[in-house]
């Protein structure tokens, strides 16, 4: 047989994850590695993702393997619980999903983040995501002045 | 949060988040969080979906939350036409979805037609004044990539569909909840859109023979929502037979004699 059924991933902190090839193929980054090299029994390093995050990402990939017995409703409930996480976890997840290139996971996390700051003031958004305000007082004032669209 | 800097999130991810937050947040809140978010919020991809909140009114400023905020910041100088043009400009020709507010002027509508050549989804507001409704059929040819149209019973459906048939070869979904469908409207749908794939008519007043006409004429339908309609029964044997090939056919709650039986 040309392909192995299992694939081994190695996280940035050295933990090994032995998973089904089909699960790994949901990551386009890993898909390209497998297509290019077809490393039989080889270990694929995932240097940008630590074990805690990788195991969470793989949990998502396992769930989202095409399963005809799971209907749309099941997924949306499961997905909602999946992203019900701390802000730092969401950050690690989106970085990992971006690195591994898993578009539906990126979309899911972006949906969650968008819902967290929709309707919030800039101050509140900075508080939730721990972002420094790097605007000067003058620049903040400029926001109002520059909005030429409001004037006929 | 050590080492996790949301302000440094890569541009693609930021844009992906920002295009989901809606015009109000994208215009008044997101750009004011930090410099990198401000830069990202100017990316045309954030502005692909221009669904204006319906509560922006021409003169009645005390109605909606968004209107209130715009008024608080821009006082009496606020012009809805200038505002709509400004938002459309942000998309730099990339807008894929557009839902204009009820206060949209003819000038703003024309502008949207000229500046949104990539438009796929058009939602026509219920509150659009008559004068603006009248020019819609004339503008349709500018939206050659249109795939989805949402309208209500006050729009000139036949004239609009005629233009879609002529100019929008990718059109696939018509959503017209609550409209009145008689012989005239049904034949407009069948004649203009024989290849329609999605049709949403929930809550419509639709004659039984019109349902039959649509089912016989639109053979490509994969989704027909005719729930809660009046003038035909949900258990009508002929209709159910004709619809049996449609993977997603819904007609629960439809009654010949209204909804109160």
Image: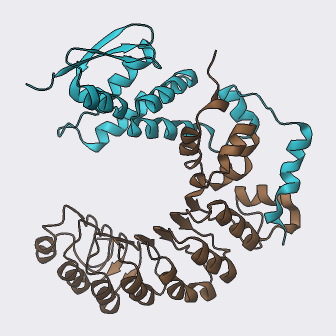
Chain colours: A cyan, B brown
Front residue of this view, candidates A37 and B194: A37
Relative to residue B246, is residue B204 depicted above or below? below
- Picture quarter containing residue B54? bottom right
Front residue of this view, candidates B106 and B203: B106
Query: Which residue is rendered at x = 55% and y = 62% of the image?
Result: B94
On-image quarter of the N terminus of chain A: top left
On-image quarter of the C terminus of chain A: bottom right
Query: Which residue is rendered at x = 33% and y = 68% of the image?
Result: B228
**Where's residue A115, x and y in %?**
56, 40
Residue reaching furthest top? A14
Relative to residue B257, is residue A64 depicted above or below? above
Query: Which residue is rendered at x = 41% and y = 12% of the image?
Result: A51
Residue reaching furthest bottom? B184
Relative to residue B154, is residue A20 depicted above or below? above
- Picture quarter containing residue A81? top left
In the picture, measured across the screen, residue B138 lies left or right of residue B73, that is left
In the picture, measured across the screen, residue B103 lies left or right of residue B157, that is right
Query: Which residue is rendered at x = 21% and y = 83% of the image?
Result: B217
**Where's residue A104, x and y in %?**
39, 39
Front residue of this view, candidates A3 and A61: A3
**Where's residue A141, x and y in %?**
89, 46
Res. B30 visible in picture: no
**Where's residue A75, x and y in %?**
32, 37
Residue reaching furthest right? A138
Res. A135 visible in picture: yes
């Amino acid at each position: 047989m040309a392909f192995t059924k299992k694939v081994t991933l190695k996280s940035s902190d050295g933990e090994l994850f032995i998973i089904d090839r089909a699960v790994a193929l949901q990551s386009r980054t890993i898909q390209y590695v497998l297509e290019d090299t077809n490393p039989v029994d080889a270990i694929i390093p995932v240097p940008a993702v630590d074990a805690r995050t990788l195991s969470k990402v793989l949990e998502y990939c396992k769930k989202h393997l095409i399963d005809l017995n799971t209907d749309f409703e099941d997924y949306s409930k499961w997905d909602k619980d999946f992203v019900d996480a701390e802000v730092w976890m969401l950050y690690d997840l989106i970085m990992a999903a971006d690195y591994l290139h898993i578009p539906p996971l990126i979309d899911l996390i972006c949906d969650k983040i968008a819902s967290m700051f929709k309707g919030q003031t800039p101050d509140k958004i900075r508080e939730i995501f721990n972002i420094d305000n790097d605007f000067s007082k003058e620049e903040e004032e400029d926001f109002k002045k520059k909005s030429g669209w409001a004037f006929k | 949060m050590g080492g996790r800097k949301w302000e440094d999130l890569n541009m693609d991810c930021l844009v992906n988040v920002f295009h989901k937050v809606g015009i109000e947040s994208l215009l008044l809140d997101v750009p004011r969080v930090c410099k990198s978010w401000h830069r990202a919020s100017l990316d045309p991809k954030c502005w692909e979906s221009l669904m204006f909140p319906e509560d922006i009114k021409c003169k009645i400023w005390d109605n909606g939350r968004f209107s209130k905020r715009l008024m608080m910041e821009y006082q009496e100088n606020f012009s809805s036409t200038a505002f709509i043009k400004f938002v459309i400009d942000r998309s730099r020709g990339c807008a894929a979805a557009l839902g204009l507010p009820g206060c949209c002027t003819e000038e703003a509508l024309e502008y949207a037609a000229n500046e949104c050549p990539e438009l796929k989804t058009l939602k026509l507001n219920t509150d659009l004044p008559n004068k603006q409704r009248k020019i819609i059929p004339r503008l349709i040819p500018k939206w050659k990539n249109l795939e989805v149209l949402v309208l209500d019973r006050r729009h000139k459906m036949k004239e609009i569909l005629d233009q879609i048939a002529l100019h929008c070869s990718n059109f696939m979904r018509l959503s017209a909840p609550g409209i009145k469908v008689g012989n005239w409207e049904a034949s407009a749908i069948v004649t203009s859109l024989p290849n329609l794939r999605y049709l949403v008519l929930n809550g419509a007043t639709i004659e039984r023979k019109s349902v039959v006409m649509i089912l016989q004429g639109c053979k490509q339908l994969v989704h027909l929502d005719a729930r809660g309609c009046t003038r035909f029964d949900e258990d009508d044997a002929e209709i159910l037979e004709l619809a049996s090939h449609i993977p997603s056919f819904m007609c629960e709650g439809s009654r010949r004699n209204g909804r109160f039986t």
